[in-house]
Amino acid sequence: MRKVTYAMGVSLDGYIVGPDGGFDWTDPDDEVFRFWIDEIRGVDVHLLGRRLYETMLYWETAAEDPTLDEANREWIGLWNPLPKVVFSRTLTEVQGAAVLASGSPAEEIARLRAEPGGGEIAIGGATLAAEVAAAGLIDEYRTVVHPVLVGGGIPYFPREERRVDLELVETRTFPNGVVYLRHRVAGSPSGTMGG
């Protein structure tokens, strides 16, 4: 069965966006960007909330910039054709390889898990991830922890009174102080990607 993963950059105090709405502290250096490129290779479909979808729209036209380096072009080549499902109450259309969700996150995940394929179903966006987590559908949490405290904002983890036992599967420390932590939800299938 296809794994559902939730991966984002996060501050050491647990936020994906600071209180001012900024997340410039997540800008990756070359090595962390290479990590994200490698991560996206294991994804078959990406589920996004509206805010993350709108942030990632940048990549739809970024290839027109003649000054882009090879790593950015490689990312575009992987990200742009990747199927995406966008959850929004306000959008009426989306661009590129994206479609608007026709059902709830749980319904979309059930539909996607029933389709053939071994790649991951990736979740992006804290609000969407909180809903998927509340339904018990996240198999792995992947945090790319940046060495910064932002003091508030949008939390990476849902703020609900629910215990979830996790198993540490992988760690990686980057020279710039960023730390990658991959945790599997205890009892979830191990899947076939990564390790």
Image (tube, rainbow, N blue to C red):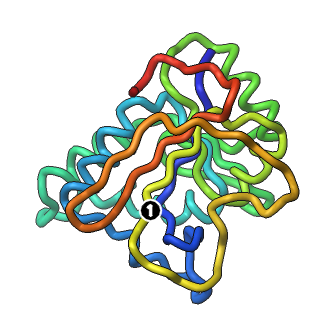
Left or right, residue 44 beside residue 189:
left
Q: In front: 172, or 152?
A: 172
Residue located at (24% from left, 67% from top) = 176
Residue located at (59% from left, 68% from top) = 14
Q: Quadrant of residue 67?
A: bottom left
Mark 1, Cα crowd under 10 Å, few <14 / some 14-19 / many 20+, is many
Residue 57 visible, this angle: no
Q: Quadrant of residue 195?
A: top left
The x, y position of residue 107, in whole percent, is: 81, 31
The residue labelled by disc 1 is 145
Residue lying at the far top of the rendered structure: 116
Q: Is residue 90 above or below residue 166?
A: below
Q: Is residue 48 above or below residue 13?
A: above
Residue located at (69% from left, 50% from top) = 129
Left or right, residue 182 beside residue 175:
right
Q: Is residue 189 above or below residue 138?
A: above
Residue lying at the far right of the rendered structure: 161
Residue 93 visible, this angle: yes
Q: In front: 1, or 49?
A: 1
Q: Amino acid at mark 1?
A: Val
The x, y position of residue 149, in whole percent, is: 50, 81
The x, y position of residue 13, in whole percent, is: 56, 73
Q: Secondary structure at mark 1?
A: strand
The x, y position of residue 181, in whole percent, is: 46, 48
Residue located at (63% from left, 41% from top) = 85
Quarter holding the N terminus?
top right
Residue lying at the far bottom of the rendered structure: 20
How many dots with numbers?
Answer: 1
